[in-house]
């Protein structure tokens, strides 16, 4: 079942999503050569608790941390730990927050020091693809209009889209219906109506789209060792167009 949110509920989701935005901004500021991913996680957790909210990922199906930190060939769900960031790495940071019963979810991928031209292009195209998807968040469109816009942009630049993980509805639960795939033909799936909130999250690989999960049971990596980027926003459907809840401005 797809739940539509009232304006009051959207305001609560806005609050959660803005906490996520603040955390991602602060953690991005900390990213530097030699920093451990667990140090980023500790700051994120402290900020969320101070804001009177809860980390949404910690304890979710047993996930052990506040952030997902996914490096280089890691697609999503990397576990923060003792890894020290190296120059040339790309780091995806995914954060979820629950405040007053409502969730927010957003992710960015950032460079560590100087990165190659190809990786800069990967990050740019993945973020652009997210925005191509967001542009389709219009009353009367269908879910797969988002999917098709994301896919067209990514594949026209020679990158590939992960199939195993998809975007999702969000609200009183971190993951709600509908699924929001990052691929597929337009004009399919549920119609978008006012009050729906979707977490749109392209995961884009330099090589093959194939993914596998590491022995830790969480970390998803590319099968061919290619690099992977991930950007995500929580976006509400409104009569005035897309409302990006997890962006500050
Ligand atoms: Mg996320
Ligand atoms: Mg998500």
Image (spheres, grey):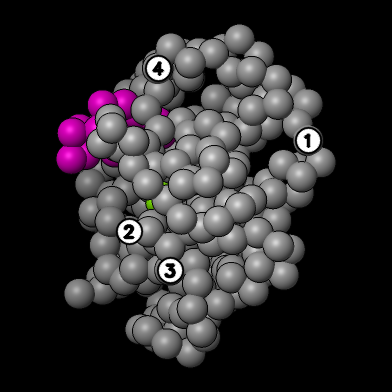
Distance CA(mark 4)–CA(mark 1) = 25 Å
Tell me whether circle 4 and circle 1 mark residues in contact (CB < 8 Å): no
**Crowdedness of circle 1 by 10 Å Cα count: few (<14), some, many (20+)?**
few
Residue 26 vs 18, above or below: the answer is above
Relative placement, left or right, of 152 versus 157 is left
Residue 137 placement, left or right of 170:
right
Q: How far apart are marks 2 and 4 (CA)?
A: 28 Å
Residue 149 % position (x, y)? 60, 74
Q: Mark 3 points at which residue?
A: 181
Is ligand 2 less than 8 Å from the beta carbon at label 2? Answer: yes
Front one among 249 and 200: 200
Q: Which residue, given by chain and number where applicable, does mark 2 sit on?
A: 170
Label 3: how many residues lie within 10 Å, few (<14), some (14-19) or many (20+)? Answer: many
Q: Residue tagged by mark 4?
A: 81
The answer as to whether callout 1 falls within 8 Å of ligand 1 is no
Residue at the (48%, 16%) spot, across then down: 83
Look at the numbered disc 3 and give the secondary structure of its residue: loop
Label 2 to label 1: alpha-carbon separation: 35 Å
Tag nearer the camera, 1 or 3: 1
- Residue lying farthest to the right in this orientation: 117
Labelled disc at residue 238: none
Q: Which residue has dot 1 on it?
A: 116
Q: Give the range drawn in magenta.
A: 54-68
- Say which label, 3 or 2, has the lower sequence index: 2
Q: Distance between the residues labelled 3 and 2?
A: 14 Å
Task: Confirm whether the magenta stretch covers residue 55.
Answer: yes
């Amino acid at each position: 079942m797809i739940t539509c949110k009232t304006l009051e509920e959207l305001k609560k989701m806005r609050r959660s999503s803005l906490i996520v935005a603040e955390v991602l901004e602060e953690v991005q500021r900390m990213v530097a050569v030699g920093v451990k991913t667990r140090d980023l996680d500790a700051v994120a957790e402290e900020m969320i608790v101070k804001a009177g909210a809860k980390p949404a990922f910690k304890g979710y199906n047993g996930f052990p941390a506040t952030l997902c930190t996914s490096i280089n060939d890691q697609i999503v769900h990397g576990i923060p730990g003792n890894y020290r960031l190296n120059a040339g790495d790309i780091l995806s940071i995914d954060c979820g927050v629950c405040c007053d019963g409502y969730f927010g979810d957003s992710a960015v991928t950032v460079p560590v020091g100087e990165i190659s031209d190809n990786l800069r292009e990967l990050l740019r195209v993945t973020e652009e693809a997210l925005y191509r998807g967001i542009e389709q968040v219009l009353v009367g469109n269908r879910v797969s209009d988002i999917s098709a816009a994301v896919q067209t942009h990514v594949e026209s630049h020679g990158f590939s889209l992960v199939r195993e993980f998809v975007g999702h509805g969000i609200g009183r639960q971190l993951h709600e219906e509908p699924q929001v795939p990052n691929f597929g033909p337009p004009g399919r799936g549920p119609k978008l109506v006012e009050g729906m909130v979707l977490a749109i999250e392209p995961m884009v690989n330099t090589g093959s789209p194939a993914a596998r999960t590491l022995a830790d049971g969480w970390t998803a990596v590319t099968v061919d060792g290619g690099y992977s980027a991930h950007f995500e926003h929580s976006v509400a459907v409104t009569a005035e167009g897309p409302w990006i809840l997890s962006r500050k401005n």
